[in-house]
Image (cartoon, rainbow, N blue to C red):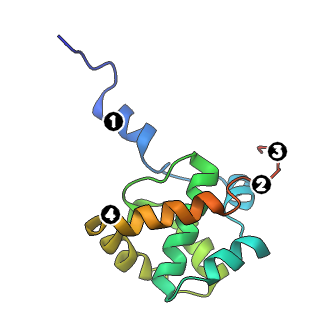
């Protein structure tokens, strides 16, 4: 009989967003450079740009993209929205579309795979 060795809380912690992101990690993983901005700028609309940026940075930071982009830590969303000059709330539209249309997420993943996924920096 299969058993579970992780509680639901432990499992969620491993597959979801961290509750907070320290400033040092925010500066390393969520600061957009010109190459990032070039890839992000190819998207139309604030929500698409913010959603793509969030996926790109999550992949760089966590090594995967959590399912619900709306659950990203507020500091992460605020930082990316500020850099893109986009309203934070536009993430909701993008997240709804990504959740209900998996092809959008797959297309984003293909783009993310060709984008610079990891920067040559040391961990804080």
Indicate which disc residue 65 carries: none
- Mark 2 or 4: in front is 4
Q: Residue at x 54, y 53 (%)?
A: 20
Q: Residue at x 62, y 77 (%)?
A: 40
Whole-percent x and y of residue 19?
48, 51
Q: Residue at x 58, y 62 (%)?
A: 112
Q: Is residue 12 visible?
A: yes
Q: Quadrant of residue 84?
A: bottom right
Asked if marks 2 and 4 touch (Cβ < 8 Å), the reply is no
- Mark 2 or 3: in front is 2
**Distance from label 1 to label 3 (Cα)?**
30 Å
**Distance from label 4 to label 3 (Cα)?**
33 Å
Q: Which residue is mark 2?
A: 119
- Mark 4 or 1: in front is 4
Image quadrant holding the N terminus, namely top left
Image quadrant holding the C terminus, namely top right
Vertical position of residue 4 compared to residue 73: above or below: above
Earlier in the chain: of badge 1 and badge 3, it is 1
Indicate which disc residue 122 carries: 3
Q: Which residue is mark 4?
A: 102
């Amino acid at each position: 009989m299969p058993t579970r060795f992780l509680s639901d809380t432990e499992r969620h912690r491993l597959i979801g967003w961290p509750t907070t992101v320290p400033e040092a990690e925010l500066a390393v993983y969520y600061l957009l450079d010109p190459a990032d901005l070039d890839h992000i700028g190819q998207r139309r609309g604030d929500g698409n740009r913010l959603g793509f940026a969030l996926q790109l940075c999550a992949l760089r930071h966590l090594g995967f993209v959590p399912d619900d982009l709306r659950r990203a830590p507020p500091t992460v969303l605020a930082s990316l929205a500020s850099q893109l000059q986009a309203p934070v709330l536009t993430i909701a539209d993008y997240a709804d579309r990504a959740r209900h249309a998996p092809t959008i997420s797959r297309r984003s993943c293909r783009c993310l795979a060709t984008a610079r996924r990891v920067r040559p920096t040391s961990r804080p």
